[in-house]
Amino acid sequence: MVRLKINQKISSEDGAREFTVDSLIHTGSGQGDIYKVHSGKDIYALKLFHTGDQKRIRRQIDILRKRGRASAAFVHPLYVVKEGDAIGYVMEYVGGEHYADGFILFNGEEVDAGGGNTVRVEIPFAQKIAVLYNIAEAVKILYEADIALSDLKFENIKINRNDFSVKILDTDTAIGGKSKPIVSGTIGFMPPLTMRGEEAPCIYNDSYALAVMIFMSLIGGHPLRGKRYEEPCTTNIDTYVFATNPVYIFNRKDNSNRPLPSDVRIIERMKKYPKYFTDAMHETFVDGLFDGKKRVEPRAWQEILERLYDDHYLCMHCGEEHFFEGTAKNCNVCGAALAPPIKLVCEKGGVAGVHLFNGTEIFSGDLWGDPNNYPLFKVTVSPYDKKYGLQCVGGQTVNLELKNGFKKEFARGDIIPIFMDAVLKVGKYTLKFIGGIIK
């Protein structure tokens, strides 16, 4: 096995660039090691393979370089390098404080709690959705081009803390059409038939891995790891649970692998998620467990994630996510009474309306499906009573009417107080408030 030394020089095969090894970033347990290198003032990462067929690896790198980068999410080979008997490539360096490991979607991250102590916290729900959506977008681009990443997992994801964009590493595992893969995948993220060696990696492996990542990020456990994982087993437990005898933990017809009673958080979280989400998971891990064509595709997962974002609200006491179509009266985490935010709707508007969160901007299309979609209001805090109201941001005059007969006209810049018995008139349209509170 070839290992590079700090300050060692290594040149690209075409002689165009020379790189100096700065540090070892990651000691690969699989294909190879990752180093931080520099060429002049430019910083890169270098992956040096220590396993695998060199001819196949070189061919795979050449294919990726000729094909071009599908999107900014993919970290792409830039230069081929060779050291002794080892081959590798130089790529974009993804690091620094503003990048986080993909594992934080599932494990959360350590934050400073003061006094030299740290505490592990989950990243906010909205941020999770944004990151998962961006991962699904990247996977979709390759999926619809019949190209498979083959080894999609948290370890190969880097998250930009500033804009929640993602970088997907180890793209050298990508294969197109009927090309022979370099790797089969990672336990837990590859489908059972691939893990058994009965099916080669393909685009449907990516739809499986994507669903695993979404499930683990939002529900908090693996979709196949239930009570069977804790039972006595005469074979390798991972092989038994993930390959030879896999059962979805929320399979509607087979309860043999339900979550352990100690996994109450997983159980309670799944209960509150909307039916369109639970149906998609069942479709992937029951109907599509052994048939990749029946799994939910990346484009559909994007639509589901968008819908989850639109449908959610947070418990005011602990920040746990909940959904408007849920029937729970109390938060499953802190037990506080749930109060969905107020919703502004238009009578005979033909659309669902808008839930009012501080800062929400409201357009005509949100209330009556207007194709011109011009601005109407922004939810803001009134400087007079410190309560939330609707600031008029459009050029339309708005008339407020209360049940007691009180009427008042509001123009651009004015803040309309929110009363649950109020009716707002905007031209020929009548608006009203329904629901609970504003957070």
Image (spheres, grey):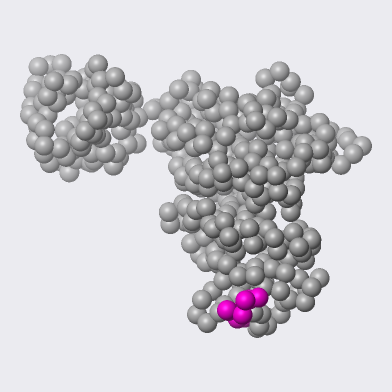
Where is residue 203 shown, x and y percent of the image?
Answer: 64, 41
Image: 396 above or below 328: below
Rendered image quadrant of residue 20: bottom right
Residue furthest out toward the right = 234
Front residue (pair 306, 170): 170
Along the horizontal axis of the image, is 172 left or right of 335?
right
Residue range (magenta): 12-20
- Which residue is pictured at 48% across the width and 62% down the height? 98
The front one of 198 and 278 is 198
> Would you say 415 lies left or right of 111 here?
left
Residue depicted at x 15% and y 16%:
403
Give the position of the N terminus as an image quadrant.
Answer: bottom right
What residue lies at 77% left-to-right and 64% top-to-bottom?
A: 54
Above or below residue 40? Residue 212 is above
Q: Is residue 176 visible?
A: yes
Residue 49: where, in percent of width, then height? 73, 65
> Residue at horizontal 63%, vertical 58%?
63
Judge whether residue 19 is colored magenta. Answer: yes
